[in-house]
Amino acid sequence: MSPTAAPLNALKSRLSSWRQDPGAAEDRQQVLRVEAEETLRVSFTVNGRPAEVDVAPRVTLSDALRDHLGLTGTHIGCEHGVCGMCTVIVDGDAARACLLLACQLEGAEIMTVEGLGKPDDLHPLQESFSRHHALQCGFCTPGMLMSAYDLLDHEPGVAQDELPEKMSGVLCRCTGYRHIMDAVSDVAQQNPEGVPAPRNCGTGQLLPRSSTGGPGSSAEDELQSRGPAEITLPSSQPTVTVSVEEHVQATPEEIWEVLQDTDRVARCLPGAELVEDFGNDRYLGRIRVALGPVKLSFVGDIHVTERDEQNRSIRAVAQAEDAAGGSVQAGVALAAKPHEGGSLLSADAELFMVGKIAQMGRSLAGDVSADMFAQFTQALDATARGEEPTQAQAPSAVAMFTRLMSQRAQSLVDRLRRR
Ligand code: FES
Ligand code: FES
């Protein structure tokens, strides 16, 4: 069976069970009503072990395996069903994990490359790949192994000259096909009665890695009850550096008064809110970012590390995760200096991003962050001048595009005027 046919068949059998069982149909209605930024709990079996993940409806099986269960053996290449890197076994058939949503798989039995063998007890396919030098960089190897396992499971003793076509669902960019075919053929010939059973489908529960969902999610409850976390910023280069300086009407004293109140400061940041005050200037906060179809909700810790009344400045560090396993860590410095009857308000931030938000690209992530900080300084100015309550809007694609275009047009006009 081709790898793309398997998920369709799995989906068809689930739809048919929903049709036959009214209770299951009610469950389906519930699943279909989950909002984009909410999470739902999905239970399935992975490599013989029960596992539960809290995922947003859009999270693919490949992301759930890698980001929520830590099973990074399933590789991701094209993410649209072409390369076969993400091949896993779902309910006994090969499937593209990038084409399945995790929420489709309630009750499914999944096998990944981790289930095939252990370092000290390799599966015969893994041994054969090693013996035949059937890998160079190894990126396609998990997909090749799982595809070969599925082939030999369904067609034991398959002829060697059929292998190039039968194995064509997985692409190797290192052109190691001849060795890969030799390795698979070797196992096929030595096991004409069928592929040997996997060696690492054991018992015990697969525990999810920490993940955070939307408001009221169990992950958020866990963060609230576990108290403040220590935040350590990476020593590597930040993904994005933001430096915004704005002349505002409020005086440094007025700005300082707002900076003393972290809840009011949070409400000036677009899409942000405080969830819990742990005391000692440590907080739990949430921030939502929506850019077209990409809607992310981050929950995490904030620690105000320095308050300098003389210089009207504060420093803070933060770290937060979203339900899809992405994370952001940030170091932020805010300061207000006297300037022409008002203040020169500066916001400097270093942001370290992982996951979908980082995939937006440095330039777009930089534009979004700079736009958010520019909105933040305006909201802070308004709040400091008594225009409360101020709740800045969560970043949206259209609003941001309009603002960026008008900012760029304005800077072009300014440049032309200066000539
Ligand atoms: S990553 Fe799934 S087919 Fe390419
Ligand atoms: S060994 Fe590198 S992609 Fe196949």
Image (cartoon, rainbow, N blue to C red):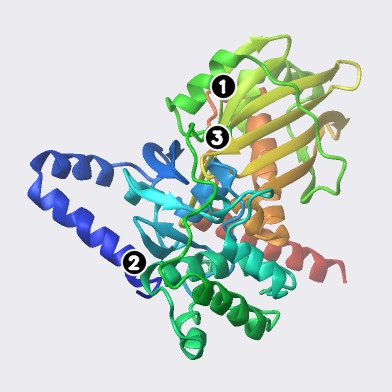
Residue for badge 1 = 223
The quarter holding residue 92 reads bottom left
| Distance from mark 1 CB to nearest ligand 1 atom below 8 Å | no
| Distance from mark 3 CB to nearest ligand 1 atom below 8 Å | no
- Tell me the quarter of the image containing the C terminus: bottom right
Give the distance between the C-alpha atoms of the residues marked 1 and 3, in whole angstroms: 10 Å
Q: Residue at x 90, y 22 (%)?
A: 311
As shown in the figure, which amino acid type bears the numbered disc 2? Ala
Q: Mark 1 vs mark 3: which is more N-terminal?
A: 3
Circles 1 and 3, Cβ within 8 Å, touching? The answer is no
Residue for badge 3 = 211
Q: Mark 3 vs mark 2: which is more N-terminal?
A: 2
Does residue 385 appear anywhere in the picture?
no
Q: Residue at x 66, y 53 (%)?
A: 358
Q: Secondary structure at mark 3?
A: loop
Q: Nearer the viewer, mark 3 or mark 2?
A: 2
Q: Tell me the crowding category of disc 3: few under 14, some 14 to 19, or many 20 or more residues within 10 angstroms, Cα based.
A: many
Q: Tell me the crowding category of disc 2: few under 14, some 14 to 19, or many 20 or more residues within 10 angstroms, Cα based.
A: some
Please, which residue is most extreme toward the bottom here?
Answer: 161
**In the drawing, does residue 48 fall left or right of residue 131?**
left
Q: Secondary structure at mark 1?
A: helix
The quarter holding residue 194 reads bottom left
Residue for badge 2 = 6
As shown in the figure, which amino acid type bears the numbered disc 3? Ser
The quarter holding residue 381 reads top right
Relative to 195, say whether 49 is above or below. Answer: above
Give the distance between the C-alpha atoms of the residues marked 3 and 2, in whole angstroms: 29 Å
